[in-house]
Image: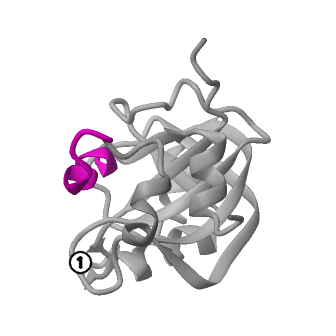
């Protein structure tokens, strides 16, 4: 029987502010955590699986020195449809598509010490066992479901 995956990894890479200034993945992710919601798009994997009360980790994607690490955990308080009036005006980044859902967060915990993925590859279910050097392929798509084990490892609980 396949394990239920009740946790998620939300991925953020560098982006642009609403005024067009390029900012790194850390600043982009922190801007979203500051407003307390995260957009999901029509093709975001797992968007139909996520439920209020579940936990997610925030992963910085990319190759910059501040990337390939987990910087925060959140609880998904609610899920709402994207609203131009409610969300677009607050959204601090430039959108390259129109989101269709929004995850609203509670219990946002920014880690004092980020969790470096590379230090835990051998403990993660999401990393391909036949070729762990290709672990980066598992970190695409904007959102991944996580096993309980992966959540514990990546949240620094193990």
Residue 118: quadrant of the picture: bottom left
Count residues near mark 1 (Cα–Cα under 10 Å), then give few for <14, some for 14-19, many for 20+. Answer: few
Extreme top residue here?
1
Left or right for 118, reference 47: left
Q: Residue at x 21, y 45 (%)?
A: 131
Q: Main secondary structure of the magenta part?
A: helix
| Residue 61 counted in the magenta span | no
- Which quadrant does the C terminus fall into? bottom right
Q: Percent position (x, y) of residue 33?
A: 59, 69
Residue in view at x 65 percent, y 69 percent: 156
Where is residue 45 shown, x and y percent of the image? 40, 32
- Above or below for 48 versus 127: above
Q: Which residue is mark 1?
A: 20
Residue beneath the point at 38% across and 36% down: 44
| 135 left or right of 145 in image | left
Mark 1 lies on a secondary structure that is loop
Magenta stretch in the rendered image: 129-140
Q: Name the side, left or right, on which 11 lies relative to 113.
A: left
Q: Does residue 79 lie above or below 25 as drawn?
A: above
- Front position in the image: 95 or 63: 63
Residue 38 percent across, percent down from the top left: 53, 54
């Amino acid at each position: 029987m396949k394990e239920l995956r009740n946790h998620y990894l939300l991925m953020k890479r560098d982006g642009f502010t609403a005024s067009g200034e390029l900012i790194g993945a850390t600043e982009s992710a922190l801007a979203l955590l500051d407003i307390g919601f995260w957009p999901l798009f029509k093709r975001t994997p797992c968007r139909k699986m996520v439920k209020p009360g579940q936990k997610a980790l925030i992963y910085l994607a990319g190759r910059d020195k501040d990337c390939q690490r987990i910087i925060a955990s959140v609880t998904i308080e609610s899920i709402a449809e994207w609203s131009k009036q409610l969300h677009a005006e607050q959204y601090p980044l430039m959108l390259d598509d129109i989101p269709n859902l929004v995850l609203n967060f509670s219990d946002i915990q920014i880690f004092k010490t980020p969790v470096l993925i590379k230090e835990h590859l051998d403990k993660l279910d999401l990393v391909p066992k036949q070729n762990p050097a290709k672990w980066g392929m598992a970190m695409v798509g904007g959102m991944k479901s996580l096993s309980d084990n992966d959540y514990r490892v990546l949240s620094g609980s193990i």
